[in-house]
Image: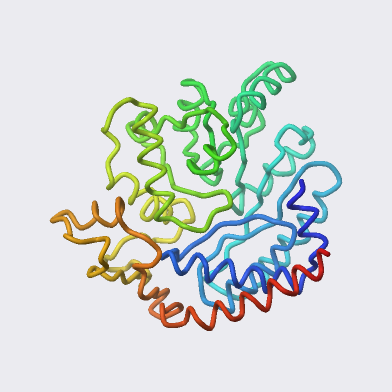
Amino acid sequence: RRIFKIEKKLGSKLIYLISKLAIYGMLSTGTTIFTTTCLYPLEVAKAASDIGVRAVVGPAFRGGCMFEESYKLLRELKMIKSHKIKPALGVYFFLSCSSDDLSAIRDLLENMHVYFHVSETRREVYEFKKTHGVFPVEYLDKFGLLTARTRLVHLGWATSWELEIIKNRGASVIHCPTSDMIFATGGFLPFKEMSRSGIVVGLGTDGGLDMFEEMRSFILLQRNNYLDIGVKALDALRAATIEGGKITEWKAGRIAVNSPADLVLVDAESIHLQPLNKNVLQSLVYLGSRVDVDMVIIDGKIVYQKEDMPKIREETSRILGEVKARLS
């Protein structure tokens, strides 16, 4: 809620400029696709379109009278003429949504993705069960909100039967390990069980910009909670690439015929990557860092080069000065 208040105070012009900085921050870590839902999705979409990055963008719906405003923003996002921008709806405060809200969201699912932040904390799940008599995922299913276009974010406190429902409905899951640890949610996303059952699990940050760090957090948290080293570097890399491509419905995340020409060039001679393991992917996941990213190509076009960083830092200082002035 505090973040939403700050967003509102900044206004559309500064949100556009800040979005550009955030996008360059993501590009510097090798990210070619991002998803976000916020108060100013049009400004974020414009920033993404101007830079040339792929983005799934939409309004953040929090229940009540906001639906008409969200619907208007989604209509405007659909009018953006860019094959790299896709509209979506984000539902953050699931407990605040009425049955009418959920019915309206169900209609949107026919044409776009909806991201639900769900079963993130034990308290949230407890309060939901006490109020509605069922668990959150069961409740979504009751309203027909679990489909192949449904994206479930966090899901650290889900039951085994809820996982079965997710699998049967074809919904996808986004694991945000760093965010979950920062906020001490105490939950655990059962990656092995989901993966074995065929549920698509992608890797997200819910705030951060560094996917190298996120891949390591993914492996460490999973191994720690399973008391087992069965989750491998390749699992983390797939979650950050191929599975992310499936979730956003771009055939991205792999180098193959008929896949988008989205490429990240990494400096294999970086000191901290030496000696380079025969399993290069393992070295990349365990030791890789944003400083290793030399270039990012999206749709066959160069959108980021490390040599651009001095110019980006200069622009960052200027924009942050404007932000501080606006918030003071």
Q: Position of residue 103 (x, y in %)?
A: 73, 38
* Residue 224 relative to residue 58: left or right: left
Q: Quadrant of residue 278?
A: bottom left
Q: Residue 65, relative to residue 275: is it above or below?
A: above
User: Is residue 120 placed above or below 322 in the rendered structure?
Assistant: above
The number of numbered discs placed on residues in the rendered structure image is 0
* x, y percent for residue 186: 53, 28
Quarter of the view holding residue 321: bottom right
> Left or right of 259: which side holds 150?
right
Closer-to-camera residue (43/13): 13
Quadrant of res 179: top right
Direction left: furthest residue: 278
Q: Residue at x 40, y 64 (%)?
A: 290
Q: x, y (%) of residue 209?
A: 52, 58
| Drawn side of residue 275 relative to residue 197, left or right | left
Between residue 327 and residue 130, name the one nearer to us.
Answer: 327
Residue at x 16% of width, y 60% of height = 275
How far across and how far down the image is residue 174, in percent? 49, 43
Query: Can residue 172 be seen in this snapshot?
Result: no
Q: Is residue 117 visible?
A: yes
What residue is at 32 percent from the left and 32 percent from the top?
Answer: 196
In the image, is 114 to the left or to the right of 259?
right
Q: Is residue 200 above or below residue 192?
A: below
Picture residue at 24% right of the left edge, 55% below the top: 283
Colouring: rainbow
Check the picture and name the quadrant holding the C terminus.
Answer: bottom right
Which one is nearer the viewer's eye here, 163 or 48?
48
Closer to us: 214 or 95: 214
